Amino acid sequence: MIDPTSDVGETTAETAPTCATCGDSIVDTPDHRVVTRIEDDEVRTRHFCDEACLVVDD
C-alpha cells in the first residue's frame, strides 16, 4: 500500500496490501484484518484477508 491515508475505494490491485497468509491482494474486502506489533523497536504491520487467514497465521 503506497499511501495509508488514501481515500476509501481508491486502492487498486497494484497498490493494495497482500494477505500475509494466502498472498491474495486485498482490495475492497470488508473483513480485512490488520495486525500491528512492535518488534525490535520497529513497527511491523501484517494484513490478512479475513478472520480465517488471521487464525491460520497465529
Image: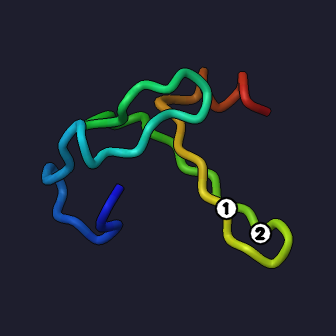
User: Residue placed at 72% from the left, 22% from the top?
Assistant: 56
- Quadrant location of residue 5? bottom left
Q: In the rendered structure, which disc, 1 or 2, sits on the residue that comes first in sequence?
A: 2
User: x and y percent of residue 22 in the render?
Assistant: 54, 21
User: x and y percent of residue 11 in the render?
Assistant: 20, 49
Callout 2 crowding tier (Cα within 10 Å): few <14, some 14–19, many ≥20: few
Residue denoted by label 1: 44
In the image, taking residue 11 as reference, residue 24 lies left or right, namely right
**Disc 1, disc 2: CB below 8 Å?**
yes
Residue denoted by label 2: 38
**Res 27 label:** none
- Quadrant location of residue 20? top right
Above or below, 52 against 12 in this view is: above
In the image, taking residue 50 as reference, residue 29 lies left or right, namely left
User: Residue placed at 64% from the left, 32% from the top?
Assistant: 54
User: Residue placed at 85% from the left, 71% from the top?
Assistant: 40
In the image, taking residue 1 as reference, residue 22 lies left or right, namely right
Above or below, 41 against 22 in this view is: below
Front residue (pair 31, 25): 25
